[in-house]
Image (cartoon, rainbow, N blue to C red):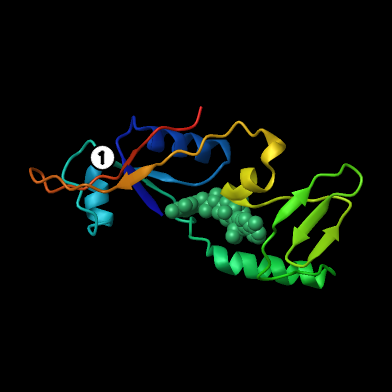
Amino acid sequence: MVGLGTPSSPWVRGVTESAKDHGLRYELLSGSELRERFPQHRVDDDDTVGFFEAAAGVVRPERGVVEAVRAARAAGAEVLEGETVLGIVPDGDRPAVQLSGRTLLARHVVVAAGAWVPRLVPGLDLRLRVVRRVQACPRSHRTGTSRWVSAGTSPA
Ligand SMILES: Cc1cc2nc3c(=O)[nH]c(=O)nc-3n(C[C@H](O)[C@H](O)[C@H](O)COP(=O)(O)OP(=O)(O)OC[C@H]3O[C@@H](n4cnc5c(N)ncnc54)[C@H](O)[C@@H]3O)c2cc1C
C-alpha cells in the first residue's frame, strides 16, 4: 500500500507514528522515488512523499462477515438472517429483543447496529455527533497533480 501526502500532513505523520508504535516495516519515499517506483501516480512536486508498506493489504469485509458467521455457527450459535430488530427492552435481568411477531429474551444484549444504535437504544445518551465528511480528489489545472483531501469537521 502506498499513500501520498506532505511530510507534515496529519495523515503522513499519523501513519508513520502508528507504524513505529506497532513495529511495522515501512518506507518513506521521496517525490523522485515515488516517480520511479510508482509512475502510475503523477507526482510532479517534491513536497509530496509516499508512505509505503509492502505487507499492507485490503480486507474484504463481506468475506470477513461470512467467516465470522460460519465460526459462530460452528461454535453453536444460532444466526438469524434478514430479521429487523424493532426494539430492545433494556430490562436489567432479562433484556428483550423485539422482532416481527416474536420477542427474544436474553441474559445480555450486545447491540452492534453501527449508526443505528441511537435509534435502537435511545436512552444510551451516547455523546456522538454524526457529521458529513466529504472526500475528494481534485486535480490542479496548473500542475496537473492530484491530491486527496478530506473536508469536514470531526466530532469533538
Ligand atoms: C464510505 C465508507 C468507507 C469506509 N472505509 C473504511 C475503510 O477503508 N477501512 C475501515 O476500517 N473502515 C472503513 N469505513 C468504516 C467502517 O465501514 C465502519 O467503521 C464499520 O462498518 C462499522 O461496523 P459496525 O459493525 O459497527 O457497523 P455497520 O457495519 O454499520 O453494521 C451495522 C449493521 O446493523 C444493521 N442494523 C441496523 N439497524 C438494525 C435493525 N433495527 N435490525 C437489524 N439490523 C440492523 C445494519 O443493517 C448493518 O448491517 C468506511 C465507512 C464508509 C461509510
In the image, is 52 to the left or to the right of 103? Answer: left
Specify the farthest residue to the right: 93
Q: Residue furthest front?
A: 101
Q: Quadrant of the N terminus?
A: bottom left
Is residue 13 left or right of 121 when viewed as pictured? left
Dot 1 corresponds to which residue?
48
Q: Residues within 10 Å of mark 1 (few under 14, many from 20)?
A: some
Q: Quadrant of residue 47?
A: top left
Picture coordinates of residue 97, whole percent (x, y): 78, 56
Image position of 55 (left or right of 47): right
Looking at the rendered structure, the secondary structure element under dot 1 is loop
**Which residue is at 40% across, 37% downward?**
11
Determine the quadrant in which ligand 1 lies. bottom right
Say which of 140 and 17 sits in front: 140
Residue at 60% of width from left, 49% of height from top? 116
Q: On screen, 127 above or below 81?
A: above
Asked if the beta carbon under badge 1 is closer than 8 A to the nearest atom of ligand 1, the reply is no
Locate residue 89, reporting x and y percent. Answer: 80, 48
Residue 112 % position (x, y): 67, 52
Report x, y in % for residue 25.
Answer: 49, 47
Quarter-wise, where is residue 149 in the image?
Answer: top left
Residue at x 81%, y 44% (from the top left corner): 90
Residue type at mark 1 is Thr
Q: Residue at x 69, y 71 (%)?
A: 81
Q: Is residue 156 above or below residue 54?
A: above
Left or right, residue 70 beside residue 106: left
Q: Is residue 60 visible?
A: yes
Can residue 50 be seen here? The reply is: no
